[in-house]
Amino acid sequence: MKVFFTLFLPLTWLYQFLFWLSQGRKKTTVLPNALVISVGNITVGGTGKTPFVQYLVQYFQKTNKEYAITILSRGYKAKLSKEGAILTDGNFPNLFGDEPSEHKERFPSVQVMIGQNRIDSFLKYNQIQSKQHIVILDDGFQHNQIHRDFDIVLLDNNAPFGNGFTIPLGYLREPISHLKRANVIVFTKITETNQKEFEKGKVTLGRLGIQLPTFGSSFRADAYQINLDTFEQTLVPKNSREQEVRPNYSYFLFTGVGNPIHVLETTISTLNTNQIQSRFFPDHYEFEETVLLALLDAKDEKTIFVTTEKDWVKVRTQNKFIEELKRHKIQLFVIRVDVVLHEQSVFESMLAHLVSTYEVKNGLVSKPS
């Protein structure tokens, strides 16, 4: 372990220097006629950015119905990421990326754009001319080329600061002290068993002089059964005795996300059963047809397949796999995750104030006398 530390510490310092250098060279651009909110993190891996972005969309659609909403993403591993693109639907995750496709699938009226150069993508594809326009940067904390009005940083409550080191010695994208750039910090994935870690995390922030509004959040998960003919989703009622409802059934979870263990734990809790086998794939896995078909080995109609929304947008494009599920009479469930903010009213009052300030600044309302 000491040899490993000695070997990688200089590389960690080099990474920090190169990160600092690259960030300093980037010019910040203001997106025209838009209120810009960033949702990001400082660690490698899943902190729950996708459901949090969706939480923000739901909030603004409910409280600011006159506003158009854009989600601006890099489109990680998307074939069109380099040139940029705007999504018309969520049917082509290989072209646009799984998370942008999931966003577009859930919110058809929201403008979703991707591009390694997000500024160019926005200027090229933006179809919203009104100043009543909210742009959400998905995974935007390190993307300082775009000026943002509000920076939300998510920390996974299970390991909010990794081991304290940046890449490659640790999992931090940038030093913890850089959290001072944020406007709000939200600890995610809080449960009854890790609640104490939330309190410890807040103490750590205070010790480092990071005095920012800090919130906790949890996930609420539901299972939806997919109609394999129409792809319509039906909520699976929760039952305290799942095995009495589906006796002799077992579940098979397959997923390619940043934190598959958390998905497994969520699935166990949601379905209220331990009768779950699992197969994990790398994050953003493309699910080739041959791989999916191999999952059917030794499976019959007493097995229910389970996956996540993020995975489903890719799986549903594999027609042969879908046909084989139907032929074997195998059901497919999708786990949908929504964010539950602790002290939600306080957090949402900050969002309301943010919009009010933007409206005054841009002449959308009269300044109070």
Image (tube, grey):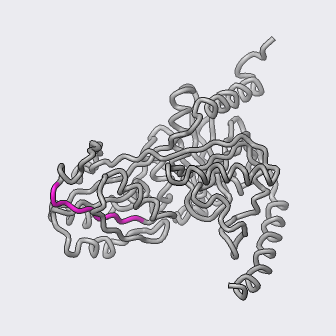
* Residue 79 shown left or right of residue 337 in the figure: right
Q: Main secondary structure of the magenta part?
A: strand
Q: Residue at x 73, y 82 (%)?
A: 5
For the C terminus, the image quarter is top right
* Residue 246 shown left or right of residue 180 in the figure: left
What's drawn in magenta, residue-wise? 247-255
Q: Residue at x 34, y 68 (%)?
A: 278
* Nearer to me, 38 or 301: 301
In this rendering, does residue 301 appear at all?
Answer: yes
Q: Is residue 193 above or below residue 318?
A: above
Q: Is residue 338 above or below residue 294?
A: above
Q: Does 250 lie within the magenta span?
A: yes
Q: Does 297 lie within the magenta span?
A: no
Q: Residue at x 73, y 44 (%)?
A: 148
In this rendering, does residue 86 appear at all?
Answer: no
Q: Which x, y percent locates residue 324? A: 20, 66
Q: Is residue 34 above or below residue 249?
A: above
Q: Which x, y percent locates residue 260? A: 45, 64
